[in-house]
Amino acid sequence: MSLLVFLLVGLVAGALAKAIMPGSRKEPGGWLLTMLLGVVGAFVGGFAGRLVGVGASNFLGSVLMATVGAILVIALLRLFDRGGRGRPAL
């Protein structure tokens, strides 16, 4: 997969993950961070997919795997973000 397509998958997956799990206004945003979230999600989704024996062979499958990975990344970040309250923010 070329770098441009990989970044495009990351941008689409990050935007979908943020639409599925919207956050508060104090969470950082922007298209660059959304793309980074999707790229990290692609790595996480690809790793998790290989663990269970699922792979993506086309663009739509790649976006789906990256979106699932990005949702997992968002959930983990929110789990460990204390938000200054002294307890996990769920």
Image (spheres, rainbow, N blue to C red):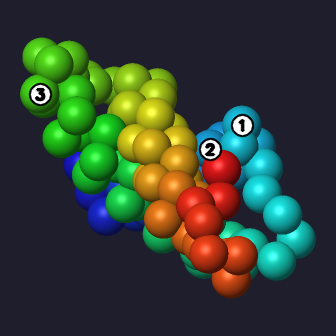
Q: Could you tell me the amino acid type at mark 2?
A: Ala
In front here: 36 or 25?
25
Q: Answer above or below: position of 33 versus 3.
A: below
**Disc 1 to disc 2, C-alpha distance:** 5 Å
Q: Quadrant of residue 51?
A: top left
- What residue sits 16% from the left and 19% below the top? 52
Left or right: where does residue 66 sit relative to residue 11? left
Is residue 40 in sight in this rendering?
Answer: yes
**Location of mark 3 (residue):** 51
Name the residue furthest top: 53
Q: What is the tally of numbered marks visible in this picture? A: 3
**Disc 2 to disc 3, C-alpha distance:** 21 Å
Q: Could you tell me the amino acid type at mark 3?
A: Leu
Residue 31 in picture, x, y percent from top left:
68, 71
**Location of mark 1 (residue):** 20
- What residue sits 29% from the left and 48% below the top? 44
**Location of mark 2 (residue):** 17
Q: Element under label 2?
A: helix
Q: Could you tell me the amino acid type at mark 1?
A: Ile
Residue 29 in picture, x, y percent from top left:
73, 74
